[in-house]
Image (spheres, coloured by chain):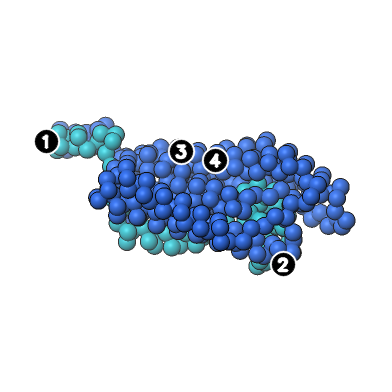
Amino acid sequence: MAQSVAQPTTTPTAVPAKLPIGAIVPWAVFFGILMLVLLYFVGAEQGATTVMSGDNVHEWVHDARHLLGFPCH
Amino acid sequence: MNSATVRNLLVRGMLAGLAAGLLALVVAYFLGEPRVDAAIAYEEAHSHEHGVETVSRTMQSTAGLSTGVLVYGIAFGGIAALAYCFALGRIGRFGARASALLLAAAGLIAVYVVPFLKYPANPPSVGDPDTIGRRTALYFLMVLLSVLLAVATVILGRRLAPRLGNWNATLAAGAFFLLVVGLAYAFLPSFNEVPKTFPATLLWQFRLAALAIQVTLWTSFGLVFGLLAERELAPKPARATTAAQATPVAH
């Protein structure tokens, strides 16, 4: 009985249901910040601004920084 | 239930970002590295002072490059997956895979292409070290501006759709995006710090390689993530549901 109802909803063109904003926000805030910190270390640390001393981070990701389009030095 | 969906999509986004990063790494190594080496050779022939190498060139062009590109892929994969959770079902009548590809295209344009056209990627020896602070600040400002503008454009397009129809609403929102980007290009300061004798061909090839890396990264992310997201969002079509329902019926 329920199978006949379930059939049409499984067509490939079905638009996925919206996810409630409230369910996304906690993940977006925590992981969004975490991802941005990762990007900061790849893209800018020990270039324009410095959190850690020395230039090892800068030198290690040097080529990636140039090729990914970040201003390097 | 919904929170679990967000978590699963986030994990899949980071995995798709890793896969896309691996492909981008291949492009970066074979198209980008020869140009970085050529630019460093130019730099060494023309600069007066030589800094002490703390990381060898071999490490920079292999392990260092891999770290940077893969972390970049994972990070943007995660961010794009979170944006996907918001966009899903809210950007029009698009399925799971089409939404992922559209989001990836928007990501490529907003995160990379728009800032790149104003502040393009520079090889070693292009760029004055004294202006690094300003160049970095303006580059990140341009990325932020462009991403916010892309979000505003989508919202504007959705608002206009009931009145203008989908086609005209998309055109109007696109025109708005181009207009504001044009204004930002016109009013933000530019930098021209290419040394006079730096080979123009090398600069062109380097920038083209940089663009190729991003096109590879975002396109493969869109395709891989779309596939994973579709499976996550419709994990129990025909086969799974009928199998699950068959058991209680038999009993």
Local packing at callout 2 (Cα closer than 10 Å; few below 14, some 14-19, many 20+) is: few
Residue bearing the label numbered 4: B215
The label nearer to you, 2 versus 1, is 2
Tell me the blue chain. B
Q: Earlier in the sequence, mark 4 or mark 3?
A: 4
Q: CA distance from mark 1 to mark 3?
A: 36 Å
Identify the residue at image location x=24%, y=50%.
B162
Question: B83 or B233: which is nearer to us?
Answer: B83
Instruction: Tell me the crowding category of disc 3: few under 14, some 14 to 19, or many 20 or more residues within 10 angstroms, Cα based.
Output: many
Q: How many marks?
A: 4
Q: Colour of chain A?
A: cyan
SS at badge 3 = helix
For this rendering, which residue is in front, B113 or B60?
A: B113
Q: Nearer the viewer, mark 1 or mark 3?
A: 3
Which chain is indicated by disc 2?
A
Q: Nearer the viewer, mark 1 or mark 4?
A: 4
Which numbered mark, 4 or 3, is in the foreground of this view? 4
Please tell me if label 1 and label 3 are on a single chain.
Answer: no
Where does the image place residue A4, in percent across and percent down from the top left?
14, 34
Q: Are marks 2 and 1 on the same chain?
A: yes
Q: What residue is pinned by disc 1?
A: A1
What type is the residue that disc 1 sits on?
A: Met
Q: Contact, CB < 8 Å: mark 1 with mark 3? A: no
Q: Nearer the viewer, residue B202 or B32?
A: B202
Q: Secondary structure at mark 2?
A: loop
Q: Provide the residue designation for mark 2.
A: A53
Q: Secondary structure at mark 1?
A: loop
Q: Chain of mark 4?
A: B
Q: Amino acid at mark 4?
A: Val
Q: Nearer the viewer, residue B167 or B241?
A: B167
